[in-house]
């Protein structure tokens, strides 16, 4: 994607965005044609898989434009907006679509997603991409793929600090749903709280995180995020244990507070990671570099989720919480040596 575009004259990455966003709309329209998603589950899986593929590929082009369009002074703010936008998408795709589904059914919910996905095309169509110097060769080399890690401090950041931070924060977030299940919450209540209610403070935390990175530094901001996650973890104690039993509205309040703090802290740490990754990604290879760095973070979060649940299963939530926080804290400590982290 960094080397070839179907129509460079219309903007190298902009063209990719127009094509892939349109394919996302078409795959959703295909889902809307499925009358019964249960009986047509095979078709739903195929079309949903296609949508995910188009969406993930589109994200590469969007990230590449972020790398090329933001200078170093804008990385903190840009990272906050990027992360906040993901939670805005969660509110629409998880909250609004679920509400529409409850009121009017499957097709109405999917058509809602079609509308908002197509709406983004208007923004892309109006965007004027800065000129891009043509590459001398379309051949992909090892340096092109992994050269971002050759920068000073980049390997320590990407291969040690980020996996530890993502592993720890991912482990903490993975504990939320099973903890609420064990507390006797219904799946509907859990879905609304984790996907809708908690997304609002997470969105605000991402925007605030960008400002805090600029004012206090990224390591300090990420450490604050770990502290907020700790508050979230402690808030679950009255919900999941008999040491301090509560019920009714108070239990709901502690559950919402815990979920919101864990996700908000996770978001603040992600904002710091995104800001550093924006600075590391090379403008001549923006999509590949940013995707590589982000994939490492996502892999760490996935492993962390598995580890957190495994530790909780063989011990308890408290031990899993402590291990997750320790990993995230260690990663933040290592990250102080990372390239461009203090900016």
Image (spheres, rainbow, N blue to C red):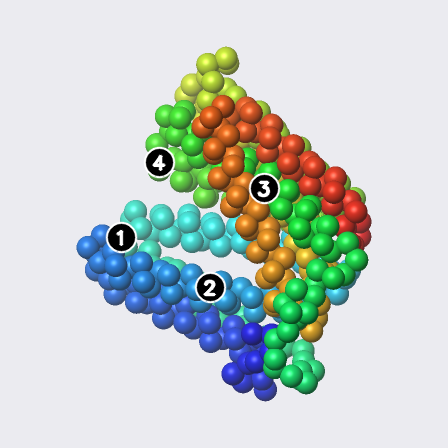
**Label located before the other in sequence (4 or 1):** 1
Give residue 296's position: percent from left, percent from top. 59, 53
| Left or right side of 105 for 179 | right
Disc 4 target residue: 187
- Which one is nearer the viewer's eye here, 269 or 313? 313
Name which residue lies at 40% across and 64% down.
51
The answer to whether residue 156 is above or below residue 180 is below
| Left or right side of 56 for 209 | right
Give residue 211's position: percent from left, percent from top. 72, 49
Disc 3 target residue: 167
Disc 2 target residue: 55
Disc 1 target residue: 105
| Left or right side of 185 for 256 | right
Crowding around mark 3 (Cα neighbors within 10 Å: few <14, some 14 to 19, many 20+) is many
- Which one is nearer the viewer's eye here, 142 or 253? 142
Find the distance from the CA under tag 4 to the CA under tag 1.
19 Å
**Label located before the other in sequence (1 or 2):** 2
Find the distance from the CA under tag 2 to the CA under tag 3.
24 Å
Q: Nearer the viewer, mark 3 or mark 4?
A: 3
Find the distance from the CA under tag 3 to the CA under tag 1.
37 Å
Dot 4 falls on a residue whose secondary structure is helix
Dot 3 falls on a residue whose secondary structure is helix
């Amino acid at each position: 994607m960094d080397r070839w575009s179907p129509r460079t004259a219309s903007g190298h990455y902009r063209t990719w965005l127009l094509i892939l966003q349109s394919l996302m709309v078409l795959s959703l329209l295909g889902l809307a044609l499925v009358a019964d998603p249960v009986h047509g589950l095979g078709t739903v899986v195929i079309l949903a898989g296609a949508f995910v593929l188009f969406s993930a590929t589109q994200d590469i082009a969007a990230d590449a434009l972020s790398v090329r369009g933001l200078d170093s002074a804008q990385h903190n703010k840009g990272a906050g907006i990027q992360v906040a936008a993901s939670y805005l998408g969660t509110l629409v795709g998880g909250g609004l679509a679920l509400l529409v589904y409850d009121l009017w059914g499957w097709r109405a919910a999917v058509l809602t997603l079609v509308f908002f996905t197509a709406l983004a095309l208007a923004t892309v169509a109006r965007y004027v991409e800065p000129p891009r110097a043509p590459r001398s060769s379309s051949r992909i080399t090892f340096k092109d793929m992994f050269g971002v890690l050759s920068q000073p401090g980049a390997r320590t950041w990407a291969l040690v600090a980020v996996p530890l931070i993502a592993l720890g924060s991912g482990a903490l977030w993975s504990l939320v749903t099973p903890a609420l299940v064990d507390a006797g919450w219904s799946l509907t209540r859990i879905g609304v709280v984790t996907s809708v209610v908690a997304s609002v403070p997470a969105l605000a935390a991402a925007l605030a995180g960008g400002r805090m990175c600029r004012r206090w530094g990224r390591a300090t901001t990420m450490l604050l995020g770990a502290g907020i996650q700790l508050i979230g973890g402690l808030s679950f104690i009255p919900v999941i244990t008999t040491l301090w039993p509560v019920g009714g509205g108070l239990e709901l309040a502690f559950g919402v507070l815990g979920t919101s703090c864990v996700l908000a802290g996770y978001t603040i740490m992600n904002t710091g990671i995104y800001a550093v990754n924006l600075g590391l990604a090379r403008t001549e290879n923006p999509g590949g570099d940013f995707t590589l760095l982000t994939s490492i973070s996502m892999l760490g979060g996935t492993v962390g989720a598995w580890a957190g649940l495994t530790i909780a299963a063989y011990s308890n939530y408290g031990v899993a919480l402590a291990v997750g926080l320790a990993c995230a804290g260690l990663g933040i400590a290592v990250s102080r040596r990372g390239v461009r982290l203090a900016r």
